[in-house]
Structures are given as C-alpha cells and as structure tokens.
Amino acid sequence: MQIIQTISELRNTLKTKASIAFVPTMGNLHAGHIHLVELAKKHAECVVVSIFVNPLQFGPNEDLANYPRTLEADCAKLTGLADIVFTPSVAEICPQEQSMTIQPPPIANVLCGASRLSHFAGVATVVMKLFNIVQPQVAVFGKKDFQQLFIIKEMVSQFNLPIEIIAGETVREASSLALSSRNGYLTDAQRAQAAQLNKALQSIVNQTKIGNKNFVQLEQQATTLLTKQGWEVDYISIRLSATLQPASQLDKNLIVLGAAKIANKTSGQTRLIDNVEFRITD
C-alpha cells in the first residue's frame, strides 16, 4: 500500500493502472468505511482511498477543528485493502480562497441542507476536485449519507462524468446505531441512547406497513418522541427514495430520513443522521 500526499505523485502513479475505484473519506475510519473499500475492490484493479478533512463542508460553528484525525490508525485499517491512500494537505486541494464552487441542485437546500447552508456546495466542490485528480471509473459512497449520495449522483449525471457511483449499505452496531465517525464523541451510555434515532425511524416504517399513511402525523410523532427523550431534532422526513421529494400516499418506494442532536461528553451535542429505505405494498 502506498501513501501519497501530492497530486502530481498520485497522477504519475495512476498512469499505469487499467481501472481505478475510489473511496473518498474524511478519515477516522470505522467498519462502515471498510465495507465501502471492500466493495470498491470488487470493481477495479486499483483502489484509491482519500483521507481529507474537507474544510469547505463545515459551517462557521461546526466541528472542523475538533474533527477526529487518526491517520496512522486509518492506514493500519486499510493495509491489505487499499492500493493507494491519498492524504493531501488543505493547501494541496484548496491552495487559495475557493471563489468557484459547484452549485448543487435545489434538493441541497432541504433536509440537512436547511440547517447547513453551504455544506453540500462544499462537498460537491471537493468531490469534483478529487474526481478530477483520481479520474476513477468507479466511486463508492455510503447510503448513510443518503442526501449526499443523491447529490453526488446528480453531479456525475449532469456533468457527464464517466464514473459509476456505487452505493454501499449502512453498517450498524448491534443496537442498530449507524456507524459514524462522530459516534466517537459519545460515551457507551450515550451510544446506547443514540440508537433511539433509528428506532424512531423504524417505527414510522412499521406504521406505514400496517396502513398508516398520514406521513405528517408520523413525522410529528417521531419528532415528539425523540424530543421527550432529550434530543434536539433537526428533521424527520418521509421522501421518495428516487428523488428525495416529499412523498404522497400513492408512492411506493420511500425513505424516511432523520437528523437530530444528542448530548455528548465534549462539545455539548453531537449531530447524528440516519435513514431507512422501505416499500409500501397494497
């Protein structure tokens, strides 16, 4: 496994590779990331994993400075899986003030984008940069960040990029808590409490499957339940899985997404996201 820090060295190294699969990450890797890398290995000769904490996707009051940076441990986890680990500096990826950015579609302004106004522009801009640097045939993203996955797919489609986007399933703890780098902020007791988010989403799915299609009421009930359990809820929303538009009672292929903040041991709150895809049958 090679660890490469500069764009020029990476491009020179990749010249001889017949096919490339790419997994972009911000590091602090867990089993969910490893699942994506294992998936990438099935689709190309060479697997490139980037570890880059993207400053453009953090708002002014978010946790950029405190975001876990665990490069040595990350590289140890990737040994035998990744062929190349790309670890550029901020200066290498964003060498000057970023005055040009990718403008994501309107769906970026709802759900997570409603409270993180420049988040998806920052994600899309740096992912586009990384795509241009790595030039993969395949890129793998996780379904846990479902809105991000949707926006990346749209970007690839609308800019005619010759990249196949592969979606990796969400990896969970035994409690059903979705694996996330931010889970590291939580104590064991808080991690157990964090599983309440998925349970609230799963309760909505169960209700729809027994015929309850009052989506607004179901969203409100889940929000109220989590609030009573001590969460600060950002949103609970039932959407069409193919478009992320609000669902109607006639729709079949749906997804319920949620984001909420839970008290943690360091900065006071940790924002967690999750989603559950489901289908309604008559």
Image: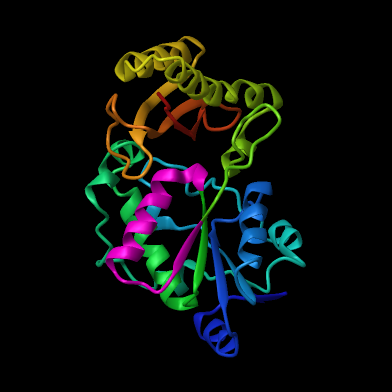
Q: Taken as a whole, is the magenta stretch helix, strand or loop?
A: helix
Is 134 displayed left or right of 79 in the figure?
left
Is 275 displayed left or right of 196 in the figure?
left
**On-image quarter of the C terminus:** top left
Count of picture labels: 0
The residue located at (37%, 32%) in the rendering is 252
Above or below residue 170? Residue 93 is below
Is 60 displayed left or right of 16 in the figure?
left
The residue located at (51%, 12%) in the rendering is 229
Q: Is residue 154 magenta?
A: yes
**On-image quarter of the N terminus:** bottom right
The spot of residue 94 in percent (x, y) is: 39, 69
Above or below residue 105? Residue 101 is below
Above or below residue 28? Residue 194 is above
In terms of depth relative to the viewer, which is nearer, 96 or 11? 11
The residue located at (47%, 49%) in the rendering is 64
Quarter of the view holding residue 174: top right
Residue that sits furthest to the top in the current view:
228
The region drawn magenta spans 143-166
In terms of depth relative to the viewer, which is nearer, 51 or 217? 217
Above or below residue 61? Residue 19 is below
The spot of residue 70 in percent (x, y) is: 66, 55
The spot of residue 241 in percent (x, y) is: 38, 40
Q: Is residue 174 magenta?
A: no
